[in-house]
Image: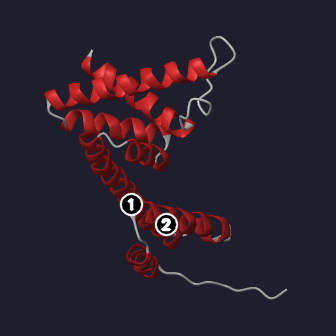
Amino acid sequence: MEKLTLLLSPGQMDTQCQVLITQTRHSGQTLAALTALHSFITATARPDEQTGSAYHEIKRILEQHIASARNSVMDDNLARLLGALEEQSLSEIQGVHAALSRNGFHQTVLAAIQRLPDARLRAAAAWADAWQRDARTRAEAASPYPDALNLRGAGVSPARFAAMSELNIYLQEAVA
């Protein structure tokens, strides 16, 4: 089988990262593309190449771009979450929740809490609590089993319920 040998300098890696950044539509795609490139480089570099300075410099460049992309993802989702809380948009909150890891969502909610004025924070906490209680009550009523929820039977999306339940926990802790 014929093989392809790739030669890559640190400068070319930086250029390739810049190209990826300009070709992606949003920060989440940028992060995914850079992470895939990092995995490819790590998996395909020969063992003797992995000890060289070029390999370490290429990895450093990639990791810098990945860290920057990760910060952009967090900033973008923080802006989305702040808007969603202001507008009480369930679909946007669910979208932010789906876009992030559990820890990423937690960190984003904590950042939003720090930015919200006290009155808006309390209003958001009251809204999230009321929504979560109503959804839980309807899901309990729709379930034929005690202490079990039938979210679908209550017309509540499980993903939306998970997002709002997590959000509610963090908001209630903040206003307690």
Q: In this rendering, would 28 be left or right of 140?
A: left
- Circle 2 residues within 10 Å: few <14, some 14–19, many ≥20: many
Counting from the top left corner in percent of width and height, residue 160 is at 49, 38
Q: Is residue 144 left or right of residue 96?
A: right
* Residue occupying image coordinates x 47% and y 50%: 99
**Front position in the image: 59 or 106:** 106
Q: Are marks 2 and 1 in contact (CB under 8 Å)?
A: yes
Q: Height in image: 60 above or below 157?
A: below
Foreground of the two, 97 or 75? 97
Quadrant that contains the N terminus: bottom right
Reading the chain from its start, which is encountered first: label 2 or label 1? 2
Q: Residue at x 53, y 81 (%)?
A: 8
Looking at the rendered structure, which numbered label has been put on residue 34?
2
Q: Residue 29 at x, y = what percent?
A: 47, 65
Total marks in image = 2
Residue at the spot of label 1: 69
For image coordinates 43% across by 73% down, the residue present is 24
- Quadrant in the rendering for residue 139: top right
